Each structure stands twice: as C-alpha cells, then as structure tokens.
Amino acid sequence: MQIAVPKEIKNHEYRVALTPTGARELVARGHVVTVQSGAGEGAGFQDSDYEAAGARLEADVSTVWTGAELILKVKEPQPEEVSRLTTGQTLFTYLHLAAEESLTRGLMASGATCIAYETITDRQGGLPLLAPMSTVAGRMAVQAGAHSLEKAQGGAGVLLPGVPGVAPGKVAVIGGGVVGENAARMALGLGAEVTVLDKSIPRLETLDDRYQGRMKTVFSTADAIDEAVRESDLIIGAVLIPGAAAPKLITRAMLADMKPGSVLVDVAIDQGGCFETSRATTHAEPTYVVDGIVHYCVANMPGAVARTSTQALTNATMPFVMALADKGWKQALADDRHFLPGLNVHDGRITYAAVAEAFGLESVDPATLVK
Ligand SMILES: NC(=O)C1=CN([C@@H]2O[C@H](COP(=O)(O)OP(=O)(O)OC[C@H]3O[C@@H](n4cnc5c(N)ncnc54)[C@H](O)[C@@H]3O)[C@@H](O)[C@H]2O)C=CC1
Ligand SMILES: CC(=O)C(=O)O
Ligand SMILES: [Mg+2]
C-alpha cells in the first residue's frame, strides 16, 4: 500500500504520525512509505532517519497527498488538507468532529474514508489511542495551570504547593478519567490540595483506592461544581462523553463566584470545551482572561512535548496502522470490533452516531459498510 506521512501544519504542532521505527516495520511488510521532508524534525527525527528506515522523502506536499492510499496524521486536517483529500483515500488521525461542523462537512464532501484515533475502543472500555495523549495532556495541565497562576500571566499569584506557614493552592479536576487522573496525580505531587469530580462511582472508587484518600473524590453534581468554583485556585476540565460535544459545566455567570485570578484549564476543548467561556487557543497564545479568570484552552497540548508524545502515540497507533496497511480499511475494521467505532466518515456519510447527533445529521452503522 502507498502510505503518506505529511508534516503537521496546525499551530505549534511538532508531532509526527510515524516514527522511523514504524516506517521500517511498514517497509519490511512491502508497503511504500512517503514522508514529507521535515515531518519528523519537531519530534527529533531527521529525514535521514526515515531514509535509513527505507521510506521515501518528498519535499512537495501535493505529491505527498496525491499518491497516497493511506494518510497518517496526528491532528484533524486543516482546511487546506481537507481540500487535498479525495475519494478512495483513507485518513487515520485525531478528528474530534463533534466540535467542528465545517470540518465534518468538508470530510463528507471529500468522499474519503476517515478513521479517528479517539473513538477506537478496547476490551476494558477505554479509548486506547486517546489514552496516551490524555496522559500527556493531563500531566501538562497542571504545569500550564501553575504557570497561569503567576501574576505576569494574569493569575492570582498563588504558588500551588504553598510554603511552610502558607497553605497550598486548591485544585479541582472535573472528570476523573485518563486526563483527570494524570492531572490530579501531578497536582498531588506538587503538594496542592486536590479534589476530583466524576459522574462515575466506579471511577471515583478506583481513584480513592489508588491514592488512598490523598485526593478528595466527589460525585459530580451542579452543587459540587458550584463549590469547586468558589473554592479552587485552579480548575481543570477533563470530562468526556466519547465522540460527543463536551457538556458546559461552568457558565459565564459562575465566573463571578471564582476568586479573581483563578485559572481554568479546559483540556476537553478538543471536544468543544466544558466551560461556556472556553475557546480554542494555540501554543503561540495559550491563554486569555474573561471576567478576571485566566483561561488556558490549547487543543493540541501534547504537540508541545512532541518527542515524548510522538513516541507514546505511535506505540499505540502502530498495530492499527499495520492492520490498515496489510488488509485495507474494510477488512481491518471488519476483523476488529474495537477498531470499527474509529470509522467516523465514509464516502460522504457520517458513521459515528454522536457526531451526526451533534449536527442534526443522519448516521450509518459502520458495521453495514464492512460486511
Ligand atoms: N487539549 C488537548 O490537547 C487534549 C485533550 N484531550 C481531551 O480530554 C478529554 C478527556 O479525555 P480522557 O480523560 O481521555 O477521557 P476519559 O473517558 O478517560 O475520562 C472522561 C471522564 O469524564 C467523566 N465525566 C463525564 N461527564 C462528566 C461530568 N458531567 N462531570 C464529571 N465527570 C464527567 C467520565 O465519567 C470519565 O471518567 C477529551 O475530550 C479528550 O479528547 C485529550 C488529550 C489532549
Ligand atoms: C488528543 C488530541 O487531540 C491531541 O493529542 O492533540
Ligand atoms: Mg481540534
């Protein structure tokens, strides 16, 4: 199969979808891998590393896309990338479609087969291709939040660990999944006072057990969120309803109840964000202030630590990339019921119910397409 790896073009996105190690595996299986020149540079992989692995290097971005049957990316395609996609091509990347109607419609119009990393499932009920980046983003969320609390960033001037004689800062994490647990763990490590809110009792039980009561676990209700809003120095938004737009849990009116200079880090921004006042930002300009509250809403947080993230992401994607390359999308999805929900768009139709619902459109059951 002809496989292409374009250079990512989203703002400050330094990850790459395939490492030289991955390229070597694909080439050994008889596939042709074309990597756009410089695609791996931000993650510390040189063109010569890909060449040594047997990949072809191509400087012209149009040529990279035109000849490909399978396109491997990291971030959702940007408008100029959507316009390059055509019928018969398979795209494998993060899509987060429920947050972006124009992207969804663009992918439908392209006629391509679009498989999202973030909606692939596993036997444990997890999201194995989202989890590695959620781990990274959760850990970064506390770094970002701690930095945003500094006065020069518009923050209240609170040091999360406190100092002897001065109490530590309070961190609330809404959503105790992969992002939430990793954020809470980092905040605990810093010495902050940490509360995790979740709607899942089993999840709260797991966290309570794992951290032996060192973080408070609270069932997520409107009242509990009100209390977090009043008390916290830093709130991290980490909820997910798979494939769907994030619920808005903190409204603009509620910002008035927060301490001035407190910080909201909305990690769920890639699914539209869980705070009413969130809008996606970039690593170039990660924060803005609304009603005295600092907002950090970067939609590709792991891109900033591209070396670590690329390795973690490709460890998880490689088995699926191999299956797509060896068998083609139809057989690969037919053979694996956890891969099947990755299909979001095929030949002009939406194949993921929550995405279709977000825009009042019809969806097709992906199982009917792979028979
Ligand atoms: N901004 C970025 O760069 C990145 C963003 N993400 C995003 O972070 C979000 C969270 O991802 P994961 O932790 O992997 O998901 P997850 O599925 O592991 O955890 C989500 C948790 O939210 C909980 N939840 C749902 N509704 C809730 C509510 N109303 N109140 C409290 N908890 C609620 C669920 O019970 C679950 O435990 C996703 O939108 C994901 O796409 C992930 C990686 C990078
Ligand atoms: C999950 C995601 O959107 C990211 O890693 O950028
Ligand atoms: Mg996005």
Image (spheres, rainbow, N blue to C red):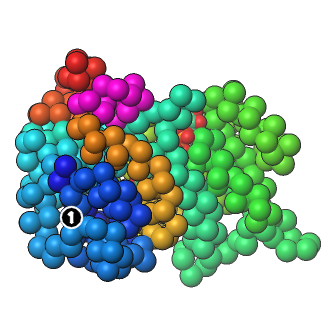
Q: Please give the name of the residue rendered at 26% of the width and 67% of the height, measured from the top-left corner.
A: 55
Q: Position of residue 151 (x, y in %)?
A: 61, 78
Q: Please give the name of the residue rendered at 71% of the width and 59% of the height, measured from the top-left corner.
A: 187
Q: Position of residue 210 (x, y in %)?
A: 79, 42
The kind of secondary structure element at disc 1 is strand
For disc 1, the marked residue is: 34
* Magenta: main secondary structure: helix
| Camera sees residue 357 | no
Q: Position of residue 298 (x, y in %)?
A: 43, 62
In the image, 175 versus 205, the foreground residue is 205
Task: Work out whether 337 lies above or below 99.
Answer: above
Which corner quadrant of the image does residue 245 belong to?
A: top left
**What is the crowding at mark 1: few (fewer than 14 residues within 10 Å), some, or many (at least 20)?**
many
Q: Is residue 334 within the magenta segment?
A: yes
- Which residue range is magenta in the image? 330-342
| 278 on left or right of 72 | right
Q: Is residue 248 within the magenta segment?
A: no
Q: Please give the name of the residue rendered at 38% of the width and 67% of the height, measured from the top-left corner.
A: 20
In the image, 324 versus 132, the foreground residue is 324
Most extreme residue toward the right, as rendered? 165
Q: Please give the name of the residue rendered at 47% of the width and 49% of the height, measured from the top-left corner.
A: 316
Q: Amino acid at mark 1?
A: Thr
Q: Position of residue 14 (x, y in %)?
A: 37, 71
| 331 on left or right of 220 | left
In the image, 191 versus 341, the foreground residue is 341
